[in-house]
Amino acid sequence: MTTNPIRTGLPPHARQVFKGEIFEVWQWKQEMFDGTTEIFERIWRYPSVEVIATVGDKIMLEEQDQPDHPNFLSLVSGRADRSQDMLAEAQRELLEETGYRSDDWHLLWKEGGEGKVMHEVHYFAARDCEKVREQQLDAGERITLKLITFDDMLALADEPRFWTSPRFINRLLRARTDSAARDELHAMIFGEK
């Protein structure tokens, strides 16, 4: 198939051996310490965006059903497969899934991109969101919006239906036990007031 001209984290001589709708499998020969070679392999997938959207002093939470994953809770999120502009992808997801938009966006952090499964997740704050239209959901989405408090968001770390990264769960747990981490996360989401 193709060699790797653009996938960060893969050697330039890696070859794509499979391409699906979401995942690509890449392989390459790697010299071992004893001079022999082995086949190494990594999976790459499109980045995702997660949006911590605020309406006043509340945070938007989605309760979702999807054909392969019924009844879960999540932030506004989705696969960034239409462009390499993560902010534009986050803005699109917010508008489509909620009908809300914001004029106050901030990239909070980025996770992932390394390891055997190469997948980046970009977390954004969308502050002071306003409803501008009805939801425009995909055929495989049923989403009900809920507005929760900051403390309710921290409690999601214990909720098995909350679908997010383990690193974000760790941030929530740290904020529950460390007042400085709590204040920092609150300021990141809502801004300095």
Image: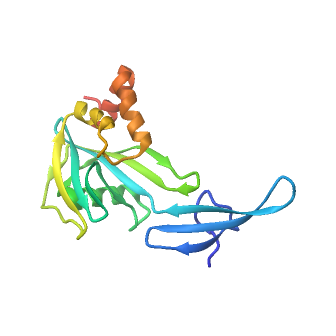
Q: Residue at x 28, y 48 (%)?
A: 75
Q: Position of residue 97 (x, y in %)?
A: 22, 59
User: Which quarter of the rendered picture does the N terminus lie within?
Assistant: bottom right
35 sits left or right of 48 in the view = right
**Number of marks in the rendered image:** 0
Which sits in the foreground, 39 or 26? 39
Is 65 located above or below residue 27 in the figure? above
Q: Position of residue 15 (x, y in %)?
A: 65, 71
Is 188 located above or below residue 115 in the figure? above
Q: Residue at x 64, y 62 (%)?
A: 41
Q: Position of residue 46 (x, y in %)?
A: 46, 62
Q: Residue at x 25, y 67 (%)?
A: 140
Is 190 located above or below residue 14 in the figure? above
Determine which quarter of the picture holds residue 157.
Answer: top left
Q: Residue at x 16, y 38 (%)?
A: 56
User: Which quarter of the rendered picture does the C terminus lie within?
Assistant: top left
Q: Residue furthest bottom?
A: 1
Q: How is the image coloured?
A: rainbow
